[in-house]
Image: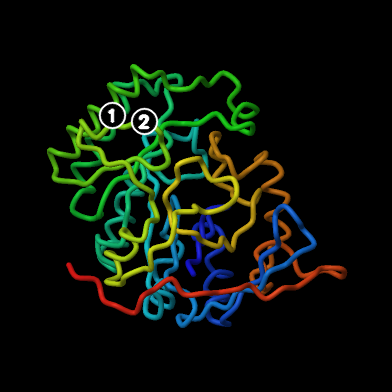
Amino acid sequence: MIINTGGRTDTVNYFSDWLLGRFREGYVLVRNPYYPKTVLRYELDPDVVDCVVFCSKNYAPILSRLHEITDRFNTYFHYTITAYGKDIEPGVPSIEESIETLRELSSMVGPDRIAWRYDPIMLWGDYTVERHLETFGRMAAELHPYVSLCIFSFVEIYRKLEMNMPDLRPVSADNMQVIAKGLGEIAAKYGMRIQTCGHKEDFRRFGIQKSGCMTADILGRANGTVFKKIPGKGVGSATRKGCGCMPTRDIGAYNTCLNGCRYCYANRDPEVALRNFKLHDPLSPMLLGHPEEGDTLKQAVQESFLTGEGFLF
C-alpha cells in the first residue's frame, strides 16, 4: 500500500513532530472524514508500506530529521511552488525561500524522488498569462536540475473555492492553450519533463505528457521498484475523473492546514482550520484530537502492490 501524508493538510509544514512520532511508534490512527466514528489503524512498517508520498509547500520543518523516514521507506516528494504571493498563499514561504529549501531536499533524497508542482494555475488580479509564464520560466531555470519533473494543472472551481474566491472564473480554453504552449517551450529549453494530472485536455503537441502524479511508473522509477498492474483509482472517492494515480491512503485530516491558501479544496474556512489546529496533540496517535468513546476501531487492510522485482533503468 501507499501512504499519502499530504493530501488533506500540509502535514510536513505544521505537524512534523507528530508525523515523525507516528513512524517511530510504527502505527497511526485515521478518523474517516465521511464516517467520523470510524477510525482506521495503519501499520507504518516497510513490510506493508510500499512508498510514503509527501506533498507540501514547505519542507523546512522536517529536513533535519527526514532521514528517520527515508532511511527505512521508499519515498516520493511533491513540492508545490507557485507564482502566488501572500494575497493568495498567506502562510507559504516566498519563492526564493521555497527554491532554497527544495535544493536542500534534493541534495538529501535526489532529484528523481521530487516533483515540482506548479498548480493550480489561476488567472486572477495581477496573476495574468504573462506573469505566470515569466515566473514559471524564472523558477524552471533554477529548479530543473533538482527535480524529476514538473506537474501543473488549471484551477477547478470547487464549491469551497466558490465561497473563498467568488469572483474567480475558470481559465478559458484559449488561455489554456497559450499557457500550455509557453510552459511546454520553457520545459523543453531546460530539458525538464512536464505533465498534467487528471485533466481531460490534451497538450501533447506542446511536449506535455498526460499522466497521473502518483502512477506506478513515477513511484517505481524513483525508488527502483516495480508495482503490480493495478488500475489507477486515485487518492480517494472524490478524485477527479480520469485520474490515473495509484490508490493511496491519506493519514491527515481536513480543515487543519494553516497555509491559508484561498484556492484550497481541503479547508472549508481558515478560521475553522485554526480552531481545529488547537485540538492537535503531537503525542496522539491521530492528527486531530484523540480516540473517543463510541469510536469503532478497525485494522486497515494493507496489501503490498510491489512485484518484488527491481526496476530496469
Indicate the position of residue 60 as horizontal and vertical percent values.
41, 59
Vertical side of 263 occupied by 92: above or below: below
The earlier-in-sequence mark between 1 and 2 is 1
Task: Name the kind of residue labelled 1 in the image.
Answer: Ala
Tell me if 118 is positioned left or right of 41 in this view.
left
Specify few, some or many for label 1: CA neighbours under 10 Å numbering under 14, 14-19, or 20 or more.
many
Vertical side of 247 occupied by 125: above or below: above
In depth, the one of 147 and 52 nearer the eye is: 52
The single residue placed furthest to the right in the displayed view is 294
Do the CB atoms of the residues marked 1 and 2 lie less than 8 Å apart? yes
Q: Quadrant of residue 291?
A: bottom right
Indicate the position of residue 54 as horizontal and vertical percent values.
44, 60
Task: Name the kind of residue labelled 2 in the image.
Answer: Glu
Q: CA distance from mark 1 to mark 2?
A: 10 Å
Circle 1 residue: 180
- Kindly report which numbered mark, 1 or 2, lies closer to the viewer in this rendering: 2
Tell me if 165 is positioned left or right of 171 in this view.
right
Vertical side of 61 occupied by 66: above or below: below
Residue 201: mark in rendering: 2
